[in-house]
Amino acid sequence: MLLTKAEITRLLTDEGHQKTLLKKADDVRKQYVGDEVHLRGLIEFSNICRNNCLYCGIRCGNKKVIRYRMEEAELVETARKASVLGFKTIVMQSGEDMYYDKDRMCRIIEQIKKFNVAVTLSIGERSYEEYKAFKEAGADRYLIRIETTDKDLYHKLDPKMSWQQRYECLLALKELGYEVGSGIMVGLPEQSIESIAEDLLFLKELDVDMAGIGPFIPHPETPLAKEKGGTLNLALRTMAIMRLMLPDINIPATTAMESLHPEGRIMALKAGANVVMPNVTEGEYRKLYELYPGKICVNDTPAHCRSCIGMKIQLLGRKIGTGYGGHKKVS
Ligand code: SAH
C-alpha cells in the first residue's frame, strides 16, 4: 500500500483507530505471507562492543557489565544444538567485537552452515570486503538497524558513529546479495512522530527483506536512564503500518515488545508480525547480554524457549514455519 508521510503520521497518532489498524495489518499478513511463523534461533555470542551508543546497555562506557565472548567451538556448538531443536535459521548477534575478525567469522559461518541452516549475522558495521567474505563463507542474511533516520538524533545517540556509514553498510549488504533486515527503535528521546513516518518511508525505499520495530527501553546504567522510553502501542502501530507498506516482508515480533508486556509478542503476531527470534544462548550469557532492562527469559533454556513459543503460536491458530523462511517477494 502506498502511504504518504501525512497518512503515516495520522495512523501513528490515531490511538482511537489502533484496533482497526492492527486488524488490517493482520489481514494483510495473512494474505501475503500466510499463517506460518518463522522461528530464528538467536545466539548472543559476545557483549563486548567498541561503540558507545547512549541507549544501549552494553555500550563500552558501561563499566558495570561483566563482559563475555564465546569461543569459536562454543558458538558453533550452541548453533548445532539450536539446529537439533529444529531451528532453520541461526542468528548470530553481538556487540561490535573485533576479536571476531574476517577469518574467524568466516570459519564460524562455514561450520554452522554444515547444520543445514540459514545464517543471519547481526554484528554491526564492517567493511565491504568483510561483508563479501562472510557472504562467500555462506552467510545468507544480515540485520543492521538504521535505528532512526533523523541524522541529528542518530549522531547525538551514537557518538563517533556516522549515519551515512551505517546507510552505506545497508547498501553494500544489498549489493552483495544478502537478504537484508533493518529497523528502528520507537520512543527515542526527541524522536518525533514525523521522524518515525520518515523511517518507515526509508525502509520502504530501501526495499528491505525484513524490518524489526522495537520500543526503546531506557537502561539504568546509560546516560538515557531517566528518559521515558517507547510504548508498546506506538511500536505496534509502527509495525502494523510497516506491514501495510511492505506487505510481503518478514516482520519479527520483537523481544523488546514482550519486555514491556507479557503478551507483547503475541500481540505483535496478531498485528502484522510473522517471525519470532527465541533466544538460544545458554546459561549466564543470557543475563549478561542486557541491551535494556526487563529482558525476558533470562533464566530459561533454549529448549524451554522453543517449546514455550511453539505453544503460544499454536494457541493463536498459526503454524511454525517448516522451511528457511526467507523473504518471498509476492510482486
Ligand atoms: N552491534 C549490532 C547489534 C546491536 S543490538 C549492531 O550494531 O547492529 C540489536 C538492537 O538492539 C540494536 O540495533 C538496537 O535497535 C536495539 N537496542 C539497543 N539498545 C536498546 C534499548 N535500550 N532499548 C531497545 N532496543 C535497544
Image (spheres, rainbow, N blue to C red):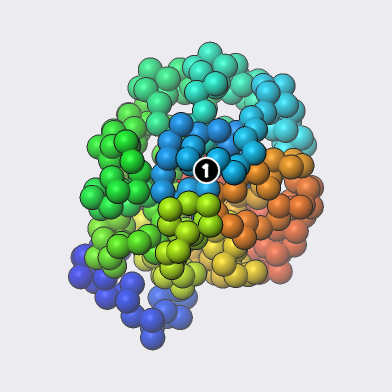
For label 1, the residue is 62
- Identity of the residue drawn at 45% across and 17% down: 133
Left or right: where does residue 92 sit relative to residue 238? right
Left or right: where does residue 183 sit relative to residue 311? left
> Residue flagged by tag 1: what amino acid is it?
Asn
Q: Secondary structure at mark 1?
A: loop
User: Residue 36 at x, y = what percent?
Assistant: 60, 56
> Which residue is more in the foreground, 145 or 200?
145
The correct choice, above or below, for 94 with respect to 33 in the image is above
Left or right: where does residue 131 sit relative to residue 277? left
User: Residue 171 at x, y = what percent?
Assistant: 30, 34
Query: What number of labels is visible?
Result: 1
Asked whether the viewer can see residue 36, the reply is: no
Q: Furthest residue to the front?
A: 63
Local packing at callout 1 (Cα closer than 10 Å; few below 14, some 14-19, many 20+) is some
User: Residue 15 at x, y = what percent?
Assistant: 38, 81
User: Residue 16 at x, y = what percent?
Assistant: 38, 86
- Identity of the residue drawn at 42% across and 79% down: 18
- Identity of the residue drawn at 73% across and 26% down: 74
The correct choice, above or below, for 68 with respect to 265 in the image is above
Residue 71 image-quadrant placement = top right
- Identity of the residue drawn at 32% across and 36% down: 160
> Which residue is more in the foreground, 309 or 28?
309
Q: Furthest residue to the bottom?
A: 16
Residue 43 image-quadrant placement = top right
Asked whether the viewer can see residue 199, the reply is: yes
The correct choice, above or below, for 6 with respect to 158 in the image is below
